[in-house]
Image (cartoon, rainbow, N blue to C red):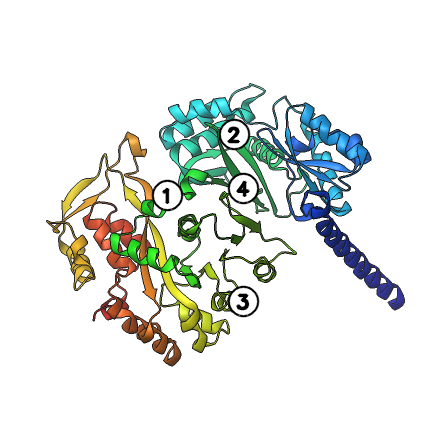
Amino acid sequence: MVQFTDDKKRDERLEELHRKEEEQLAEMLAPKYGVEYVDLTNKSVDTDALALVPEADARAAEVAAFRKVNKKLFVAMRAPEREDSLRAALALERLGYETRRFIVSRASLEHAWDRYHDLSFATETEAGVLTLSNETIQQMLETLKTLEDVSVEIKGHMGSKDIHRISRVLEIIMGGALSLGASDVHLEPEDTGVRMRFRLDGVLTEVTVFDAATYALVSSRIKLLSGLKLNIKNAAQDGRFSIVVNEKEIEIRTSILPGAYAETIVMRLLDPSTIALPMEKLGFDKYLMEIFDKEIAKPNGLILNTGPTGSGKTTTLYAFLRRVHNSGIKIVTIEDPIEYHLPGIVQTQVSRDYTFASGLRSTLRQDPDVIMVGEIRDAEVASTAVHASLTGHLVFSTLHTNDAAGTFPRLIDMGVNADIIGASVTVSMAQRLVRRLCPDCRESRIIEGKDKEIMDKLLKNIPHPEDIPPGQNTMWVPKGCLKCGGIGYKGRIAVVEVILMDRDMEQAVRKSSSERDLWVASAHQQIRRMAQDGAIKVLQGVTSLDELTRMVDVNDDTLALNVV
């Protein structure tokens, strides 16, 4: 019996080695055949694309169409030079598609072919199950102006006997989310129903409640669109699909988790226009723009942006990349996931076999000038990023800390030698996103009482007081109107703090890992803290004091240390 177990483990190890060897071989052969390489075993497959090649033909020619974006079709091939494989690709091109060819392993093809099982479900339902009507969504962008509008439309179709009612409900959900500028759609089953919420400017807001029967059909439709298995309900699944509105492709990433009552679904909307912002649109004051322009123009160094998930760190780094990009340098990114495609930049996405650590090591062999690492998560990535900055590379990355001063003890905790931090890290910044007041309905109010105490504390000895508008005894508060959906806020803006590496900071990092000591050492740089940056925006009418206190600790006692 023991011998049997050992044999089984040995066979499993051999099978895993064989799989890795086949993946490596496919990757090595890609340049020879002039195609790209992809590992599909850890990626979702677009069932719309898959259905374009009949299963029998796909298996015979060892091909699989695995993604479709408008008229662009991604086609996986085991052997790109085979005549039957080439004929299959040409047949797709005769249908009007522009094919993008990839060499893959047998395991990748098997993973894709497994999705034909999902298509069998689709053929049993009404026509159009795998598509969203972009024309309808465009109409909804004009009619769905408030959360109430979305709720009323959904409830009206839930009771309908129309065979297309589920497709219609899903169109309303996505159309409403796009119209209101939601970043995420949450579908959360509970005891009495299924709650749907939109995340609007970072805040979850309830829209409506589904009955269980309708939700079961909606969740199946979402799974089909996202290329997920319908018959799996006790495991997490991730997928994606796309919507094209006004010739702009918006990608929706789907995450499904098993829950106590039914599966919980979150759909994240990745709108390129919301993340592809230039530096001028991020809300940096003039003195900060001058600092960033100077620092990102350096040929080497490590620029770290810190903050919690959803604080806009990636958007800021993308803006930096766009700023430094030119035809004379090579920029490589390692992301999880790639949220926005930047022309002229090599972007890679982490996977099971391509981690931040291995990706960064491989990237350094590509002769890059600028590297962006999506996140420093462990000691290996931290060490490699630091050494990359010491060897002539400009490195951008993110780190999870509460504030800019927390960057340095966090790196030391990860095992980075304090003696080399000063030579590698050039900028440590932290940011949060606060909601912008709606300019059409905001109201002015005299600052008094507790609000005045807070503002007086933040404005005392504040760096760069020239940005304070005249009449600083007035601030602005939300009201609500049709243009902002009755919320009083529309859009978000960053509040930022920065610490630059100089002689004083380098000595402080070597001597102490106390954040208080580091803030004292940086005081001479005369850069505002996040709360102070937010206070200026409150006085300028950009955001409200309530919103600032929701996102930033305005009572942090280290604020008093930021004084020369």
Q: Quadrant of residue 63?
A: top right
Q: Residue flagged by tag 4: what amino acid is it?
A: Arg
Residue in the image at 56% along x and 58% along y: 367
N-terminal of the pair, mark 1 or mark 4, is: 1
- Provide the secondary structure element on which disc 2 rests: helix
Where's residue 388, x and y in %? 51, 65
- Provide the secondary structure element on which disc 1 rests: loop
N-terminal of the pair, mark 2 or mark 4, is: 2
N-terminal of the pair, mark 3 or mark 4, is: 4
Residue in the image at 43% along x and 25% along y: 140
Q: Nearer the viewer, mark 3 or mark 2?
A: 3
Q: Tell me the distance, in whole angstroms, between the alpha carbons under discs 1 and 3.
A: 35 Å
Q: Nearer the viewer, mark 2 or mark 4?
A: 4
| Left or right of residue 101, residue 511 in this image | left
- What residue does disc 1 label? 201
The foreground one among 19 and 330 is 330
- What residue does disc 2 label? 170
Q: Residue flagged by tag 3: what amino acid is it?
A: Thr
Q: Residue flagged by tag 2: what amino acid is it?
A: Leu
N-terminal of the pair, mark 1 or mark 3, is: 1
Tell me if I can see residue 493 in this picture: yes
CB under 8 Å between discs 3 and 4: no
For residue 384, which numbered disc appears in the image? 3
Q: Residues within 10 Å of mark 1 (few under 14, many from 20)?
A: many
| Left or right of residue 96, residue 278 in this image | left
- Provide the secondary structure element on which disc 4 rests: strand
- What residue does disc 4 label? 253
| Left or right of residue 133, residue 18 in this image | right
User: Is 457 drawn above or below residue 346 in the view shown?
Assistant: below
- Provide the secondary structure element on which disc 3 rests: helix
Q: Residues within 10 Å of mark 4 (few under 14, many from 20)?
A: some
The foreground one among 171 and 517 is 517
